[in-house]
Image: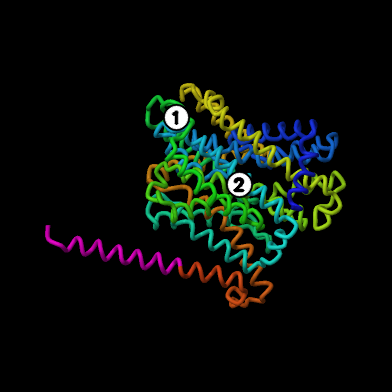
């Protein structure tokens, strides 16, 4: 009953007129941020952080939180309609864009909106119920455990790729190598920069994502010499009952996965979407359709994305550790307001903690209104000829890329990856595994080297620690199973060829 009392206490603060207004502003701005290619919540919150000085504490934090999780809703629109993703909507480009090509844009966006609502609701329950104790779970993970967790992420390659497994592994390796470009954080030495000053800080995630997906897709469409719009057919929002029954299980699975990964530093929405997609592709009743425009491919990742965005507040508010760059900015906003996130926050500022938790559910309702009934309005923006639309898309891609570091070189890098992505498309190579390797590669290297430093070069530490040893055991079982299945399939194929016609 304590949780109901605490939530009722939180809603007393969240439902005040001022806090409702700031929540609505945050959700609306977040949705617009998600719609614009490249302009993510990190840049937006950093720009608006100085404004929080003039806004009451609760309203300022509610607004900034709304921008963060609101962007997770909005970024699905550009990914599904134009194949231009943010970091947390890369997986939505796979099945979401395939649904667009089949004239099911409205259904895809409805699925993403409802699944995000489900994911957000489940995560809020987890946040309210387990935040006082669940943040301590992150403290149980050491460098060896995070290293094993990153390796589990690489196992997702076999599920994320829509082509052959060999091509997927090759693309993932290319992504890992791209992630090594820049300055080594341990030694300070430059790696693979070719003495080019603009590569000293490495290649940005936004540049790679917008180039390999957005600009490459635009180039492919222009190369086809076909007059087309970003999506075809009429906008049918409401799914049939059989389609709706396919959404719910996938959204619930994604909610659980995202809620768990959102707690762990190094997890968050980016990793959660890949994990949810991999699980769906393995356990879903319609797994054979995933990758070619299945509802499950949109529902699971959208729910995981939104759930991870909510539960990422747990380590920040429970133990005072931000798990990603956005949470670091949120921590700065707390400190600016004279509040130190950590174990004493719930006891010292219960009205702020429970008010923020309750406002997330209010924001969830705002976002459901913005992203489901108003889907037709959002899509009406794109109902113009592609020859007129694509210069605007390129413009926003350049603005989004430039806004990250205020550096023109990032635009040139994005254009270069646009050309590389176009070559990949012509060779029928999927860019999603490349993004997975690009994201996980540097993280794996960091935790691997940190683990070896702490163990003084003892590799057995990866197997002696209970969490990492269990994860590595699961990886070994999975790899053995995959290799066995591959050879059995090859044997059956050879036997079929030897049989006389």
Q: Is residue 254 left or right of residue 358?
A: left
The residue that appears at 54% across and 49% down in the rendered structure is 252
Q: Which mark is residue 243?
A: none
Find the magenta span and give its range.
Answer: 478-501
Measured as percent of width and height from the top left, residue 128 is found at 71, 51
Q: Residues within 10 Å of mark 2 (few under 14, many from 20)?
A: some
Secondary-structure class at tag 1: loop
Q: Earlier in the sequence, mark 2 or mark 1?
A: 2
Camera-nearest label, 2 or 1: 1
**Which residue lies under the disc numbered 1?**
231
Q: Secondary structure at mark 2?
A: loop
Residue at the location (79% across, 38% down)?
60
Is 415 on the left-hand or right-hand side of 341?
A: left
Mark 1 surroundings within 10 Å by alpha-carbon count, few (fewer than 14), some (14 through 19), many (20 or more): many
The residue that mark 2 highlights is 204
Is 421 within the magenta? no
What type of secondary structure mainly makes up the magenta span? helix
Q: Position of residue 386 (x, y in %)?
A: 46, 25
Q: Specify the quadrant of the image occupied by residue 101.
A: top left
**What percent of the width, then of the height, locates residue 391?**
52, 26
Q: Please state the horizontal and vertical placement of residue 33, each as a whole percent of the image.
A: 64, 34
| Cα distance between the residues tagged 2 and 1 | 29 Å
Would residue 9 be visible to someone looking at this image? yes
Q: Give 303 or 416, whichever is nearer the viewer.
A: 303
Compared to residue 409, the image places residue 192 above or below, namely below
Closer-to-camera residue (240/399): 240
């Amino acid at each position: 009953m304590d949780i109901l009392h605490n939530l009722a206490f939180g809603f007393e603060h969240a439902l005040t007129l001022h806090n409702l207004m700031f929540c609505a502003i945050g959700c609306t701005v977040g949705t617009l941020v998600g719609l614009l290619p490249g302009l993510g919540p990190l840049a937006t919150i950093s720009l608006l952080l100085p404004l929080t000085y003039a806004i009451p504490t609760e309203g300022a934090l509610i607004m900034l939180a709304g921008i963060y999780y609101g962007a997770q809703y909005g970024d699905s629109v550009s990914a599904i309609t134009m194949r231009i993703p943010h970091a947390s909507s890369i997986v939505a480009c796979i099945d979401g864009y395939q649904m667009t090509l089949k004239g099911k844009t409205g259904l895809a966006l409805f699925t993403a909106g409802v699944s995000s609502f489900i994911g957000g609701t489940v995560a809020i329950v987890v946040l309210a119920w387990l935040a006082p104790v669940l943040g301590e779970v992150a403290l149980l993970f050491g460098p060896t455990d995070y290293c094993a967790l990153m390796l589990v992420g690489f196992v997702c390659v076999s599920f994320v790729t829509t082509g052959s497994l060999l091509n997927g592994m090759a693309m993932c390796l290319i992504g890992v190598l791209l992630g090594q470009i820049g300055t080594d954080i341990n030694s300070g030495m430059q790696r693979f920069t070719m003495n080019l000053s603009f590569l000293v800080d490495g290649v940005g995630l936004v540049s790679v994502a917008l180039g390999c997906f957005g600009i490459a897709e635009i180039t492919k469409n222009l190369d086809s010499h076909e007059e087309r719009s970003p999506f075809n057919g009429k906008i049918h929002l409401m799914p049939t009952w059989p389609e709706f029954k396919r959404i719910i299980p996938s959204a619930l699975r994604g909610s659980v996965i995202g809620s768990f990964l959102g707690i762990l530093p190094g997890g968050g929405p980016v990793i959660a979407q890949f994990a949810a997609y991999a699980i769906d592709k393995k356990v879903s009743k319609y797994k054979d359709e995933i990758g070619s425009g299945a509802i499950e491919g949109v529902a699971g990742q959208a729910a995981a994305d939104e759930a991870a965005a909510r539960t990422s507040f747990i380590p920040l508010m429970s133990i005072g550790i931000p798990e990603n760059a956005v949470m670091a900015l949120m921590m700065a906003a707390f400190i600016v307001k004279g509040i130190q996130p950590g174990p004493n926050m719930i006891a010292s500022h219960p009205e702020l903690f429970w008010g923020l938790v309750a406002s997330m559910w209010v924001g969830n309702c705002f976002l459901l209104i913005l992203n489901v009934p108003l889907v037709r309005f959002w899509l009406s923006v794109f109902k113009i000829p592609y020859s007129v639309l694509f210069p605007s898309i390129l413009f926003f891609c350049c603005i989004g890329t430039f806004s990250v570091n205020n550096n023109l070189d990032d635009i040139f890098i994005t254009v270069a990856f646009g050309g590389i992505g176009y070559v990949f498309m012509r060779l029928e190579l999927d860019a999603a595994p490349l993004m997975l390797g690009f994201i996980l590669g540097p993280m794996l290297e960091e935790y691997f080297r940190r683990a070896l430093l702490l163990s003084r070069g003892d590799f057995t530490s990866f197997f002696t620690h209970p969490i990492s040893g269990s994860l590595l055991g699961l990886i070994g079982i999975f790899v053995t199973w995959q290799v066995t299945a591959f050879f059995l399939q090859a044997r059956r194929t050879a036997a079929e060829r030897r049989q006389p016609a």
